[in-house]
Amino acid sequence: MVELFHKFGIPHDFTAERVRSINHSFSRRSDEQNGFSSWFRLSYVSAASARTDDESRDGEDDATENSTTADKYPERESAFFLQASADTSATLVCFDAGPRVKRRMYGLMKSRGWTDVATNPQILFDVALEGLHEEVDDTARKMEEEFEPLEKVRSDGMISSPRTQHEELYLFARHATELSRALESALMINEGILMNASISIPSTTSMGNPPSPSNNISISRRSLVDLQLKECLEYRRTLFHSTHLRLSHLQKRIEAATALASNLVSQQQSAAAIQGPVSMKLIAASILIFLPTITVATIAGSGLLLSEQLDEEGSWDVSATPLFYLLWYISIPLTLVLVLLSLCWLWWRRGKSGNMTQASSWFQKVMIWRRHTKEKKEHDEESSMPV
């Protein structure tokens, strides 16, 4: 790798971007031999199936069928370094290029447009952007397709595990945000290439030579290639904008689904909170039903009552001890005192709230009377003023 960097003269800034985890960059450096070096870097999320060179849709579905949302959209960082010289030689070094970019590059080498690369080497950047757009557009389309079932479950209110559903919504929102950032970066890169598209390299064969018909044909061909490159880049800009609009719509749908999920969870929590007082009422009713039985059983099982079997036929004699009567002598007055204290406390609370209400109404009446008196006094003063 170090030898590769030295061979093509890759500057230190290119490697520093990787060390500092730069998500997007574009640069162009001219040299003394009338050539230039240019590069751009783009970080984006792609579908897991797009990381393989297998273009079969069935293979993609099998590879991602059992994957989680976090594994389906891994992050990819692609970088492209272009070196062009005045002797019509151009070299493009691709770092972690996706399958769509590779396919576009192979298609360019087999097409008639391959000869135009020597005229304007930045055609290679346009082809790389074309492949990158296909990858991010396929990722946005796949995210939209996988979000539809989750959105339908949310709209129908069928939530089996709210925590899992919230995690999936969070992952969708995070991936959509990262992909939106990548699209904005791609638009800035496209604008940078578009600004430099008309900067051509003077050929060594035409430098210092007088104009000739062949040179005029070469100049006209160069102008045509530059114009076509500009048109392709402008069209590429509209494609990136279109994908960005689709992703913005998806982000709004994710926000709406998240808000709906929060409302449903709040309703479930409210229903659980409502069931709490109902449970307390059921417990109180159960105690009220069984309290007399428990009281009788407690008294019968204590030493307040004595039982004695009279004969073998099963006759029993039950008699109360003096403690039984003492129990009622103490408990009945104590119960009455507690009831009386409770009634007094309730009466005091009600009287205090009534006084506050009366004081508040009395204060309002006083304020209304003062306002009325003041207005009447001002009216009398105005009436007594000479005309």
Image: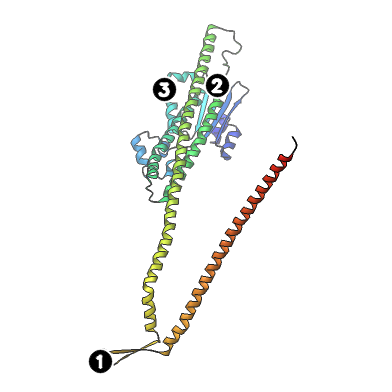
Secondary structure under tag 1 reads loop
Specify the farthest residue to the left. Answer: 313
Residue 109: give x, y in percent of width and height: 44, 23
Disc on the earlier residue, 2 or 3: 3
Residue 190: mark? none
Is residue 22 among what the camera can see? yes
Nearest the camera: 367 or 70? 367
Q: Which residue is identified by label 2?
A: 197
10 Å neighbourhood of mark 3: few (<14), some, or many (≥20)? few
Instruction: Tell me the number on the disc at residue 312.
Output: 1
For badge 3, the amino acid type reads Lys
Vertical relation: 226 (above or below) 340: above
At x 39%, y 74%, the residue is: 291
Instruction: Identify the residue position indicated by label 3 in the image.
Output: 110
User: Looking at the picture, how far across and down is residue 284, in whole percent?
Assistant: 41, 68
Q: Position of residue 359 (x, y in %)?
A: 61, 59
Do the residues under discs 2 and 3 have CB atoms within 8 angstroms? no
With 295 as the anchor, is 87 left or right in this view?
right
Q: Hey, what amino acid is under mark 2?
A: Ala
